[in-house]
Amino acid sequence: MTELLVNGGRHEVHGSVLTTLAEVLRGHLGLTGTKVACGEGHCGACTVLLDGAPALACITLLEAVGEREVTTIEGLRDHPLVDAFVRADAVQCGFCTPGQIVSAAALVRETPAPTREQVRHAMAGNLCRCGTYPKIEEAISTWQG
Amino acid sequence: MSARTLSRPASLEALDETAVPLAGGTDLVPLVRDGLVEAETLVDVRSLLPRGVEPGGIGIGAGTTLADLERSGEVPDALREACRLAASPQLRAMGTIGGNLLQATRCWYWRLAFPCYLHGGDRCHAREGEHREHAIFAVEPCASAHPSDPAAALLALGAVVETTRRRLPLAELYRLPTEDDRRLTTLAGGELILRLRLEEPDASVYLKAMDRQRWSFPLVGVAAARYGEETRLALAGVAPIPWALGSPADLDAATPLPGTAYKVDIARALVGRALAAVR
């Protein structure tokens, strides 16, 4: 039994040694906003925050999370970035979008008005195979309305 | 998949020889899940490793993340740039500098568990196969390329590694594989990197050529660090281990494979730019 702090709530979850945080979020807690695409830490679809820092849930072991607080896309439901992504039409197929918004949330928390270069640097770990990058940049640069 | 237990010890003293230490896990977790690393016991050392940069950039805890180093005003430019240009933001926030030095090659044959020389077999599949991202030095008996950007920077910066058992120059952390021992590091079972110490240079730089402008392993990375009149050079992505270059002319002694000859030209250009930058 492992205790996990997710989006402000405590959960008791089971897993084996190699169970990943992504598997637990999706399979046990029903938080399916966290996506798994590559499953090996390349694409960023599974990005969550651990104590505010972006992390890849598909290569984070459940048992290694420890006391760190997990924030998933569901925990960012009311973040203005969500509306900004809609306004900028920064979504095509949408599969990478949760991870994009989580990474963007980590960026704007530290740097509320990032330059284009800062956006590109901070978002480099979130791949979008539909190629909506210009719209994603627009969303992040206009998130404050 | 192969790992039976994950333990969280109270101290680093009691690591036994079969323990596989886990910190950021960015390389180790996929390798264990893919069965490329056998780990009877994973030992979570993340919260036990020293983390942070001592004033002056002289001492760096092994648990310091690449993101910490990327943002640190205390470390030499070459190391900060190497960290900034490495991996992705998520991986830099997770991965530690100690683990980064020990990451496995990106050679696709090795990662796909071909029975290659590095896995204990009798040939290097990359030599006759696909090898455009592989080595230009020490290409026999294994043509893999070492993927760490920070390792090249730290090699040029004369880093000394402190482990749970000894102190050694970073160059001695690495070894080329031999017939009777295919490992690429000299770290013993249960031995853990605790800290790095380096000499503050007068100037340093890290330059990197990659397939994309971001989030890509180095085709060639070049670190240069100047101490007075002496400039030390070290390269990433060109040999199975981080590669110190005695002088720019040493690039003439490269022995590239047909598909990696272009890397010699890139290395020559980046070495020239790096030397100009630290002059």
Image: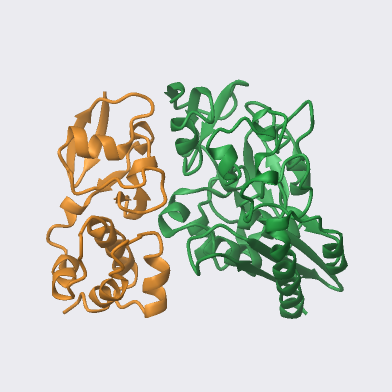
Examine the rendering and report whether any part of residue B157 can be seen: no
Which residue corresponds to the image point at 79% horizontal and 48% vertical from the top-left? B138
- Front-lying residue, B86 or B265: B265
Q: Position of residue B198 (x, y in %)?
A: 72, 56
Q: Position of residue B236 (x, y in %)?
A: 67, 57
Q: Residue furthest front?
A: B128
Q: Position of residue A140 (x, y in %)?
A: 26, 73
Q: Quadrant of residue B254?
A: bottom right
Give the chain ID for the green colour.
B
Q: Quadrant of residue B193?
A: top right
- The correct choice, above or below, for A8 with respect to B165 in the image is below
- Is B201 displayed left or right of A53 in the figure? right
Which residue corresponds to the image point at 19% horizontal and 77% vertical from the top-left? A144
**Quadrant assignment for the C terminus of chain B:** bottom right
- The correct choice, above or below, for B8 with respect to B200 in the image is above
Tally of numbered tags: 0
